[in-house]
Image: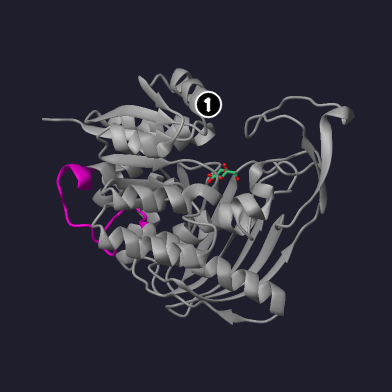
């Protein structure tokens, strides 16, 4: 069978995760990569061991006969790249958030639908098997009626005023940073698990470090390179370091969520607890193979990942047997396996049925981010205005 051909746009941290995951599928060739210019393209090709490189994504799309492109560039370029690819009929996997703002996402979804392309947005973390197990427990009614959904996504990679990244500036990443960058993973998970989407938000956003020191030269995300005072210029920050959100959900559940990128010691602490009328479940991404199950009239349980006793729909996403740990990279493989499986088998592109998050998911989450920004500005509850719904 002819292998599908993938093209990568961007060569940063997340490109490694995508390339490795796609290669593990076995039926896809990573055929080409493009960077911002020919040199960046070549550097990415060397790093990722990809044969063909380009200095312009249009040239790569025009010349490489690709089935799928992966958009792994800063948020400000997602829209134009996705429009170009969709108009050439190329299927798209896009990193989150889908676009800089909701209006762009509305347009992108329409263009993707008009051109009949498969589209996915990279909420890889919904693919931890225990997240899927929580979803299946919820669907089977084990939790009862979901009443309360609370948790956080905490990091510390923006803790010092010398921490800098393109995401900090609204012109590159969009008006919202912390909520759009990591809060959307949390929205995706709790909505995917409970089947309830967020209807209203009351948000307090704050920028804890209003002026940061940007290095005069580029270095990688999460780099530990040490810099001296002469290496920096001062920049005023126009995006939030943290957000505290009150939430209402479509099925009547209430919620509280904290997102912060300035919590010392917290690396990628994504955590949720869901309290239902029968049981509670709690999970944290730093220990992805365990889930706590709470009950009023029986001993609480610690469920350690074991595909043998999980719901089949959840067990199929386990990459390893029994208590052997799952990895962050495996969640990319599972997401891309669902997405490329649809492309390979020419299954209908159906947002409501897709296991993977689609452009509609991306539009829905930018609708939440939009309401979060408005609520924080007004200091009041804001109802989320969804142009369309159906993928969470
Ligand atoms: C940085 O906050 C980041 O790399 C996010 O962009 C990813 O989506 C998240 O999974 C890890 O942290």
The picture quadrant where one finds residue 334 is top left
Q: Residue furthest left?
A: 1
Helix, strand or loop for the magenta stretch, by majority? loop
Report the colour scheme: one colour
Does 348 lie within the magenta span? yes
Q: Residues within 10 Å of mark 1 (few under 14, many from 20)?
A: some
> Which residue is found at the position 77% from the left and 32% from the top?
216
Question: Is residue 329 or residue 277 the one in the foreground?
Answer: 329
**Which image quarter is the C terminus in?**
bottom left
How many numbered tags mark residues here? 1
Image quarter for ligand 1: top right
Q: Height in image: 325 above or below 51? A: below
State whether residue 191 appears in this view: no
Does 119 lie within the magenta span? no
The picture quadrant where one finds residue 222 is top right
Residue under pointer 1: 40
> Which residue is found at the position 29% from the left and 65% from the top?
140
Residue 178 location (% of width, % of height): 64, 55
Question: Is residue 106 or residue 285 the one in the foreground?
Answer: 106
Residue 2 location (% of width, % of height): 14, 30
Question: Is residue 215 or residue 307 the one in the foreground?
Answer: 215
Task: Write the start and end of the magenta stretch as one range.
Answer: 341-358
Left or right? Give the position of 270 relative to 327: right
Residue 322 location (% of width, % of height): 35, 34
> Which residue is found at the position 32% from the left and 52% from the top?
86
Left or right? Give the position of 96 relative to 153: left
> Which residue is found at the position 64% from the left and 41% from the top?
267
Residue 151 location (% of width, % of height): 59, 60
State whether residue 34 appears in this view: yes
């Amino acid at each position: 069978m002819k292998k599908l051909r993938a093209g990568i746009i961007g060569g940063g941290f997340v490109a490694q995760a995508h390339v490795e995951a796609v290669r593990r599928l076995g039926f896809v060739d990573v055929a080409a990569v493009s960077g911002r210019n020919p040199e960046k393209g070549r550097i990415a090709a060397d790093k990722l061991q990809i044969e063909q490189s380009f200095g312009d994504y249009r040239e790569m799309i025009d010349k490489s006969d690709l089935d799928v492109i992966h958009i792994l560039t800063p948020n400000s370029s997602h829209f134009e790249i996705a429009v170009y690819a969709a108009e050439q009929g190329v299927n798209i996997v896009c990193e989150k958030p889908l676009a800089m703002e909701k209006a762009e996402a509305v347009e992108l979804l329409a263009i993707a639908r008009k051109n009949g392309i498969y589209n996915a947005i990279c909420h890889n973390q919904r693919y931890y098997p225990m997240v899927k197990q929580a979803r299946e427990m919820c669907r089977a009614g084990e939790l009862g009626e979901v009443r309360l959904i609370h948790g956080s996504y905490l990091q510390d990679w923006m803790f010092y005023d010398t921490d800098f990244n393109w995401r900090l500036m609204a012109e590159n990443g969009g008006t919202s940073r912390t909520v759009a960058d990591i809060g959307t993973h949390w929205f995706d998970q709790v909505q995917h698990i409970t089947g309830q989407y967020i209807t209203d938000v009351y948000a307090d956003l704050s920028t804890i470090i209003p002026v940061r020191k940007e290095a005069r030269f580029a270095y990688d995300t999460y780099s530990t390179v040490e810099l001296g005072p002469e290496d920096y210029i001062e920049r005023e920050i126009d995006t939030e370091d943290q957000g505290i959100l009150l939430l209402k959900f479509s099925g009547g559940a209430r919620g509280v969520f904290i997102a912060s990128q300035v919590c010392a010691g917290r690396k990628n602490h994504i955590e949720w607890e869901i309290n239902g009328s029968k049981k509670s479940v709690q999970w944290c991404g730093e220990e992805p193979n365990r889930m706590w199950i709470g009950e009023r009239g029986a001993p609480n349980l610690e469920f350690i990942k074991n595909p043998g006793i999980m719901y089949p729909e959840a067990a199929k996403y386990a990459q390893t047997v029994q208590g052997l740990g799952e990895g962050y990279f495996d969640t990319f493989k599972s997401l891309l396996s669902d997405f490329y499986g649809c492309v390979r088998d020419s299954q209908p592109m159906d947002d409501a049925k897709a296991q993977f998050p689609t452009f509609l998911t991306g539009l829905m989450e930018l609708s939440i981010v939009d309401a979060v920004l408005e609520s924080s500005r007004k200091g009041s509850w804001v109802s989320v205005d969804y142009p369309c719904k159906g993928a969470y």
